[in-house]
Amino acid sequence: QVQLVESGGGLVQPGGSLRLSCAASGSISRIAAIGWYRQTPGKQREFVAAIANIGVPDYASSVKGRFTISRDNAKNTLFLQMNSLKPEDTAVYYCNVILDWKSKAAPNYWGQGTQVTVSS
């Protein structure tokens, strides 16, 4: 079982950018799809972006056009470039494998995540 560790979060002003990284303990080349999720206090964790092994991405409508997901199989790392950040993007961001592309269901175990705060 590959362990995933998120990093790159922080405090940024509205309109700013951040790049999140997700480092895997093993090879991700055989993982069919992997993605990002986020959660704010009192709310369910929600899907943000996913990328298939062949490079096809998918995004939540709320981030489409602002966020870009990418994966480097050689470095076993997943990235999320976040531009034009809004206060409503504030959340803890997690990466995880995607069990089902259509539903974006993920396994019921999560890492510590990385906090993203968008505020002036």
Image (cartoon, helix red, strand yellow):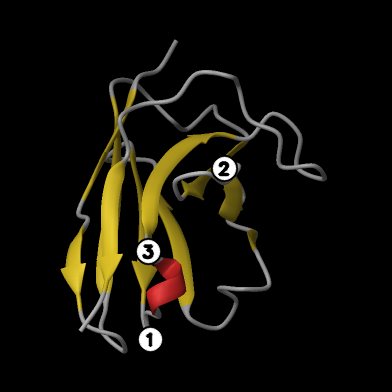
- Crowding around mark 3 (Cα neighbors within 10 Å: few <14, some 14 to 19, many 20+) is some
- Three-letter code for the amino acid on which mark 3 is drawn: Thr
Q: Which mark is residue 90?
A: 3
Q: Which mark is residue 84?
A: 1
| 4 left or right of 28 in image | left
Disc 2 marks a residue whose amino acid type is Arg
- In screen coordinates, is 74 left or right of 103? left
- Residue hosting label 2: 45
Q: Earlier in the sequence, mark 3 or mark 1?
A: 1
Q: Position of residue 97 (x, y in %)?
A: 55, 32
At 44% from the left and 25% from the top, the residue drawn is 110
- Position of residue 99 relative to residue 86, above or below, is above
Rendered position, 119 above or below 73: below
Task: In this rendered view, identify the residue nearer to me: 41 or 69.
Answer: 41
Q: Position of residue 64 (x, y in %)?
A: 60, 76
Which residue is pictured at 44% across the width and 30% down the height?
28
Q: Quadrant of the C terminus?
A: bottom left
Q: What amino acid is at disc 1? A: Ser
